Amino acid sequence: MTIKDLAAKTGYAVGTVSRALNNQPNVSREARDAILNAAREMGFQINENARRLKQHQSNTILVMVKGNANELFGAMVETIQALIASSPYQLAVDYSDEDDNQVARAVDLCRERKPVGILFLGGSNQNFLSDFGSIDVPCVVITHDASQLHFQNLSSVSTDDAQAAKAAIDLLISLGHSRIAIIGGDRATSDTSRLRYEGCMRSFREHSIPFDPSRDFQGVRYSYRDGYQAVQTLLENGCRFTAIFAHADVMAIGAIRALWDHGLRVPEDISVMGVDELPLGNFLVPKLATVKQNTARLASRGVELLLDAIENGAPAVHETVPFCLLRKESIRDIRKQGENKICVQAAF
């Protein structure tokens, strides 16, 4: 008889059964009692060699960060480090490329470092569906909703990215903009990018505003350089717009510089809005309009949920943290003064 047999008998995940049999703390009392009673009834014998191997678990909490240049995640890591510093655990931070499968990477690190828990910053639910099943320690995703995955050891804390993006487009439309270009991330590898794109499209549909993604959308990496290059591509493609919505402040800041280099002023000619409220945005001229995420709350709540799961066997929890729109100097109302100067190739 194996642990898988016992899991099938009790209805609990293999990881939960393993933790209960090995007397680890992160299992609820109800689950532990049910598993141990079933083990006695079925005459299950623990492999002592395997148990000794399992006990070589560290006190490390892993933080898996998707993207090497994401300043929002950098701020979250600082908050997480401060909180973990006052706990009995040590922190290990692992950075991966935007296009990498960080869940598969976490599986490898679990074998090497044997962490007690994992925090994921960014990622794709598709990667969790394909690879997370072999991870049996408590985990929390910070940045996107994992409730539909139904893993017993996976919680999530997130902003409603689709609604946030829709609110940003709704604001620009309320200011008279109907020709809006979008700079976003890779929707295939990032749920955040996909949801923000879907939110934009929802707003365009509700306002009956046409949008041609082949011309008006640029999917790039989350960086200043890529935001700059995205504007160049939009202009080269003949895209005509009065506003740009970038799915991250780093892209928006790069976009503002590109517009300036092509003789276009913000917001007099083009309005620009981002997401995240990076501190740098408040020191730009003009100050960057943005969707503010409560990064401190996202990070701190993620740590709270993880520690509760590690130490008390708390079940998976999925929470949404509110956002707010910050209308600053980089966007303007064009309803009374007519449309802004429209970008064309001649702007070069």
Image (spheres, rainbow, N blue to C red):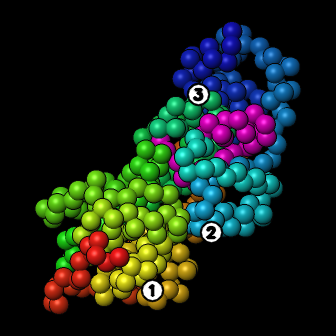
Q: Amino acid at mark 1?
A: Lys
Residue 186: percent from left, percent from top:
44, 51
Of the residues shown, which amino acid type is indicated by label 2?
Answer: Ala
Q: Can residue 11 be seen at all in this image of the molecule?
A: yes
Q: Residue at x 50, y 57 (%)?
A: 221
Say which quarter of the image contains residue 341. bottom left
Q: Please tell me whether mark 3 sits on a helix, a strand or a loop.
A: loop
**Which range of residues does the magenta coloring cover?**
103-125
Q: Quadrant of the N terminus?
A: top right
**Discs 3, 2 touching: Cβ within 8 Å:** no
- Residue annotated with mark 2: 75
- In the picture, measured across the screen, residue 38 lies left or right of residue 82, that is left
Q: Is residue 28 above or below residue 14?
A: below
Task: Give x and y (percent) for residue 319.
Answer: 47, 55
Per the image, label 2 sits on a secondary structure element best described as helix
Return the disc, 3 or 2, that comes first in the chain's sequence.
3
Q: CA distance from mark 3 to mark 2?
A: 34 Å
Question: Of callouts 1 and 2, which one flags the residue occurring earlier in the amino acid sequence?
Answer: 2
Question: Is 115 located above or below residue 264 in the figure?
Answer: above
- Place of residue 226 in the rendered image (x, y in percent of width and height, measured from the top left): 49, 63
Q: Which residue is mark 1?
A: 287
Camera-near label (1 vs 3) is 1
Closer mark to the observer between disc 1 and disc 2: 1
* Of the pair 26 and 157, the residue shown nearer to us: 157
Q: Is residue 270 left or right of residue 208?
A: right
